[in-house]
Amino acid sequence: MSLKKQALSGVKWTFIQQFGVQGIGFIVSIVLARLLEPEEFGLIAMITIFIGIGNALLNAGLGSSLIRSKELNEEDYSTVFYFNLVVSVIVYLITYFAAPYIAQFYKQYILIGLIRWLTLTFIINAFAIIQTTRLTKIMDFKTQTIVAIPSLIIGGIVGVIMAYQNYGVWSLIGFNLVKSLANTIQLWIHTKWKPLWVFNKEKFKH
């Protein structure tokens, strides 16, 4: 495929992904809003900033540097994969032990469990950062779309079922966890990339 056709295909599939994700997300949100109380959405909103900070730490730098780099081998990808995984565990542990203090600040002690479960997405998503990076590097936005939309649908179905079963705010936790898990599993299936059992310190420094 020529560079021009590849670029046009990338634009097309990016549009489809954005439109599909936003459309399906909107529908899921409406359904959940009818089944859950506003206070339950408020609980999730309280911890959104901490989730955002954690995701920013995980996505900072290395993934983008791989996309820009021209000469890469499997050691490069594997080294960054393990680094991301370690960072995700560290960030998760920080939020895990910070959860009681966050809950105390808001005077909402249910936040302890919500934070500790929702931030598991840090580790789940870390398993897919390299897969996403590799797809972006070759401008394969079609595969990313094929993965993102079903993941949202699967997560949405789980969230709605949990809401119908009166799980309350935990429906939103289930939705996010299942969506992340489905996304990661599909990326591993579609890309067929697996890390080597190697961490090259010299390559990491560069």
Image (spheres, rainbow, N blue to C red):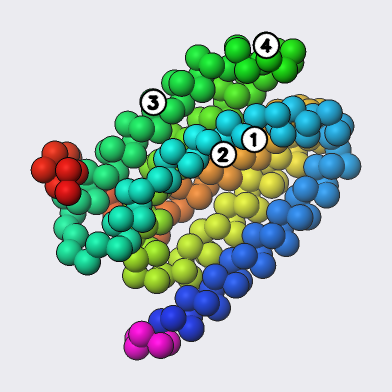
Residue 42: % across, % down: 78, 31
Tell me: 77 left or right of 29. Answer: left
Give the residue pinned by disc 1: 48
Tell me: 34 left or right of 133. Answer: right
Residue depicted at 17% across the width and 64% down the height: 71
Residue 138: % across, % down: 34, 70
Give the residue pinned by disc 4: 104
Q: Residues within 10 Å of mark 1 (few under 14, many from 20)?
A: some
Magenta-drawn stretch, dominant element (helix, strand or loop): helix
Q: Secondary structure at mark 2?
A: helix
The Cα atoms of the two marked residues, 3 and 2, are separated by 15 Å
Residue 119 in view of the camera: yes
| Res. 74 image quadrant | bottom left
Q: Magenta segment, which residues?
A: 1-5
Q: Residues within 10 Å of mark 4 (few under 14, many from 20)?
A: few
Tell me: 129 left or right of 8. Answer: left
Give the residue pinned by disc 3: 90
Mark with earlier residue (4, 2)? 2
| Res. 7 image quadrant | bottom left
